[in-house]
Image (tube, coloured by chain):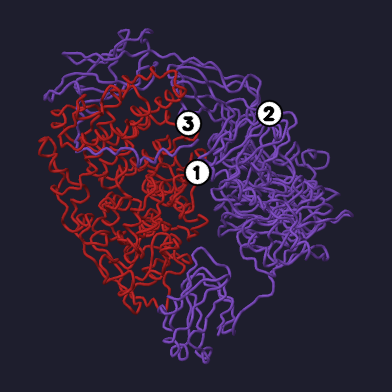
Amino acid sequence: MKKIFAYIGWVLTVVLLGTLAACNPKEIDESADLGLNIKVFFPTKVVAGQPMTINGSGFSDVTQIVFPGDVTVTDFEKVGGGMIRVIAPSGIAAEGGKLIVRTASEQAESRVPLTLGNTVVSGFSKQEGEDISGGEQLTVFGTDLEFICRAELIDSEGNPLILEDEQFHRKGTNTVIITIPKQIFEGTWVGKLYTFDGKEILLPELNYKPGGGHWETVKTVFWTNDDPEGHGPANWNGTYRFALEGHDGANECIAELPQDVWDIIKNGTFYATFQLDPNWYQIRITNGHWSVQWQGADNDFKPGNMDDQLIPNEDGTRTLEITFGSDPLVETLDDKHLLFTGSGNTLMELFSLEEVWIDDGGETGPVQEVIWTNETGEGPADWGNLNYRFGLDGHDGNNECDATFPQEIWNRIKSETFYALIEGASPQIRITDGWWSANLTPDDIKPGSDLLIDNGDGTWTIVVNLSGADALLAVLDAQHLLFTGGGFTLLKLFFQEGGPTPPGGGGDEPGGGDEPGGGDEPIKTEGTVIWNTETAFADWSATILIGPEKFADAQEGDIIRVYLKDKGSDYNPIFKHAEDWSDWSEFQGAKVDGDGYFEAAIPAGALDELKSKGLRFQGVGFTIAAVTLIGSGPETEGTVIWDTVTAFDSWNATILIGPEKFADAKEGDIVRVYLKDKNSDYLPIFKHAEDWSDWTEFQSAKVDGDGYFEAPVPAGALDELTSKGLRFQGVGFTVAAVTLIPGPPQYEGTVIWDTETVFADWSATILIGADRFADAQEGNIIRVYTKDKGSDYNPIFKHENWSDWTEFQGQKEEGDGYFEAPVPAGALDELRSTGLRFQGVGFTIVKVTMIP
Amino acid sequence: MKLDRIAIFILACLIPASCVDLNYTEETTRDEEWTYEYFENGIKNMVFDVYAQVYNNEFGNNSAYFLASATDEAQYALETGAVNNYVNGGWSPANPYSNIWTKSYTAIADVCMYLEKLDEADITEWQYNPDYSLWVQQMELFPYELRFLRAYFYFELFRTYGDVPLVTTTLTNAQANSITRTPADQIVKFIVDELDEIAPYLPVTYLTEVNSEVGRATRIAAYALKARTLLYAASPLFNPTGDKSKWEKAAEACKFILDNAGNWGLKLSAYGSLWGHDAFYNPELIFGLGRGEDNAFEMANYPVGVENGSSGNCPTQSLVDQYEFQDNGETFRSRYPGSIDLSVVNPYEGLDPRFALTVVKNGDSWPTNNAQKKAIETFTGGFNASPKYGATPTGYYLRKYVDGSCVTTADNQTTRRHTWIIFRLGEFYLDYAEAVFNATGSANDATYGLTANEAVNKLRERADIQMPKFTEDGAAWVARYERERLVELAFENHRFWDVRRWKKGPEYFRTIQVANINSSLQLTRSTVNRQWDDKYYFYPIPQTELKKNPNLTQNQGW
């Protein structure tokens, strides 16, 4: 369990009236000069080449340090008079011995011996032939591992990649944990470790794969022909002439290119796309003076000559890959420009292609934060016979839990994504509470579920996020968290930033939308999450590709909503076709911006491509936090209190709408259940939340409508609704959504203000005119009906001059959906002459009435 | 048993002494043999003792340690507040604010002693204890943690006093009373060399260490301390020749942190999440001091008029004037240079969101707990204003770090955890910007891969901040950067030291502006004069130390 080390308020705080001195208990004499003396050196076990420090006294005159085996060192650094830094030399005696410091006239010996280390690696967390991905940790086991100072791997381009020990995740005497860089060379090879004394240790031969992302080819366009017809095809003229920026004094060029592009043209590989005359074309690439031609004098690209290098494109154009290399043309380009000429060819664009690493999972982040492991080997789960039960510290009076967690961890379990590692061939997992009253998912989690990741080694990782499961959360403290089912053994529970690539969609989970991964504050989303990796679009190389599988159930009219984290001044997001990266105009044309997101509805014509190829985004000036797919669903009336599609195909099916959803419910409000399907055995039942019995007051008033059934909230149900919630059970239908529709409002008294006014800050106010109080009497009640009561709720009766009207404030009482105060006698004159003002924050005034 | 030993220990500690006798006597239990034979109650507690001394009572009700009121950030509500001695001429070698000297050298002495004694640690008697192997793992880290802490205290000493004695072993009385001051450059080198040496051995995070004791010294904290030390060493106070190579070193050290932040799990957080009950787990926090549940800080800084509120450290108009408006980056002072009629205009609307999170102004609903929440009145005659004794002298109250959910009524008080930030990621964007600007001469130079403006804008473009970007260069950049640093790091114990290392004491600390709001809600500015002398760039060496050690020289001017 994570302990908060820093709550050291309970630890004794040292209160010393001390100065510099911590007296050496063995040397209380008053001499300021203790002569040459070694008090301590660090570390006491070394290998050659290792930095050391020696502490003592009288070091200012030290000229030699003698290591065991009579190895003398004269090259060292003195730090004040009491410290020396030195590198341990080679040749130290294997048996070790005392360390000696010498001046011209004396020497001092260390109290404890120095020993020679010997790094021995006994094993690794990965064995020969296993796979390892970028971002994963590799643990080295052994003894004297603190002497390992670097690792040598291979980077993505095949070059040596050195990791210094400051990049190890942990370096101890018995373990060293190395994080494999994401962009590692893909292949099977052997890495190496080195110690300070030059010992080389081979890592096991592993199958390395880049991880936490993938390579994508990114096209960067240098120049586009903005008027092909106007410029026309080349005709042995100088139309398509290009210069380095600032090198076109005579304005001969169609474009000047910046230095970095010019460098690519001269020294790298770029591409030119042409529209070619089907009858005849000839392409010559030369300089503006026609003095040097690429590929040799008069050696033009034309039908029958090098035309195989002109790769056809889908749109009929053809693209030529150009690498000048050491061609003499290159030396002339700065002064004489680059010219594409010939005949029958129209230059359409110049571009480069680059392999860019696209991070999938955000930053590597720290290792798994394991909060429980199955140390006793308990298992496998067997429904009622053996479960894994967890609770909050202090809430396990019957010792039923496998473990309890401190409040901080419990809070995180309730609010953050965490993971459960299980093993088993055919697991079936139900995550519920200890009383089996509220399941996390309507159906048990089995292979094929989005929440279950096959690790490929006989283990699975369950992705658990309780944050939307209101019914389960409501009972979790008292009733514990239960992993039950069959065919699996629970191995551990852990948090892991970045996660083990959690699935993009959470499936149908009770309580509403998933929360995306990444970011330190979850964003509330609507709909099914189909992308949950925070991705910054800082330039045009950034992109995400949402795979076709995420759109398997998409329908025309569903909304693709992209939640944003940051939005810059250059904000420009673009829906793109997955494969060719071109703008998806049907989406772009329908794109709308919302508060913290942009979205577009799926047109009918896009469904096939979405389901076969997926969807790409590109752009600049924003960061994607998540992308969701919001079902078009039924048109609903009222406040949605349940929005997860839930099939009632057996009597096991149930939904529990938590009491908090009914906090503002009133007698007469309508509970309406929108249906997606309705079968011949259709039988829906309102149920009491806890004991599952029929709620007859609702059932007897239930009516069926077009695509829904509903019932009004009876007065007698409010207490139970607001304390326990409402359950549904039944068969033969699928719930699409449940809403609470306000009943007809009831306002008592004469309305003296009926303009809805939001009090979000102290600038908000209403002034009810004196005329409204013409008939006011002492004792009348001024009642202010409110809604949207915030945590900072603070309404104030005010004089017209804005000062607090204490006679009202002192009598103010809160009611259900209103606050009120009686009119005191002393207020009548002022009410009738200047009226009444309200100010405050954290509420909205709906109406104000005066009740006799 | 533990409480008994602690009781004896406290008694021992209160015995005045020019050095603490750590031999095994009935006066102290500090160095008894048993200490090195017990893990939890012995060795580990020794290490905890040193950590405990990092805390400077910032969250206590003794505001002498909350240095904000000795800067243009705040004015202490009561003239008799001890912190006022910094600015009213009461600061002297005889009244030296010697806590940093005392506690730092006490801690350094402890570290030296423990390092020299750790080889005597022997817990093999407990080898059959189920936790034995875990204890051994933890002990592996103690020397590195202690060396980090020693480097931390030397940073505090060098920052405060400049040249200070460099002590790396235990000393006798005589040695301690004859030691000389080591030049600051060498102290800096010692700090940096130590941190470079120990950093690889410290874990990146304690989440995966034994007992997951978050809050201990990490590798990141070591590199953070190194970067900040190098920044100070490059600053004018310690770099009178303007040696560019010092700025370059600082820039490299800061960039190292920024480049690795993601891999280390560090992220910029929402500004308002940097303090509060759960701030200890904030992913931006590199090293913080967690305190147990308490409400002393709230009592010290809630407005008078709020039950048990003492006003405490009141933000100044000088601070408020530095906030910029979101629409165009204009400062508050620039847009509202003179008096303001608060009854007709809300001049704070559209101001940098960090303002509302830092400062309580007239009309704000505060504190946030339902029992005490009300509209704060800082106009003369208002409920939280003069003529009430101890009311704000500035027109504002402190919000940052104050947990408004704490109830401080006589009955039903509530308490909350507090976390004092020592290092956080946001600081290093600013440190880097300053270092790279001075190293390259431009705010738009990308030699190090990130320009100064890009670094500052990382903070400005946070989703909850969204302030106009920096584009300036030259002197204009410096002025705006100094404003940004004040705003971002307000009340985090930076301003007091930043102005000193920039050698801009007269510019910022000689006079401050406060706001007076009359009963008609007219806000006018007035000037408060403060004592500033250039000797204040460094603290005086305590007189008591000079008397004991004739080899110690006093800082110039004192």
- Dot 1 falls on a residue whose secondary structure is helix
- Circle number at residue A380: 2
- Mark 2: few, some, or many residues within 10 Å (few <14, many ≥20)? many
Say if residue A329 shows up in the picture: no
Residue pictured at 56% horizontal, 75% vertical = A845
Which shade is chain B? red
Compare residues B102 and A660 and report the one nearer the observer: A660
Tell me the quadrant of the picture where the C terminus of chain A can be found.
bottom right
The spot of residue B15 in percent (x, y) is 17, 36
Compare residues A341 and B389 and report the one nearer the observer: B389
Say if residue A678 shows up in the picture: yes
Q: CA distance from mark 1 to mark 2?
A: 29 Å
- Dot 2 falls on a residue whose secondary structure is loop
Residue pictured at 22% horizontal, 17% vertical = A63
Dot 2 amino acid type: Pro
Chain ID, mark 1: A
- Mark 1: few, some, or many residues within 10 Å (few <14, many ≥20)? some
Q: Residue furthest right?
A: A680
The spot of residue B471 in percent (x, y) is 45, 58
| CB contact under 8 Å: marks 3 and 2 | no
Dot 1 amino acid type: Glu
Examine the image and state in which quarter residue B90 appears: bottom left
For the residues beneath circles 3 and 2, the answer to whether they share a chain is no
- Circle number at residue B209: 3
The number of numbered badges drawn on the structure is: 3
Where is mark 1, residue-wise? A408
On screen, A492 above or below B370? above
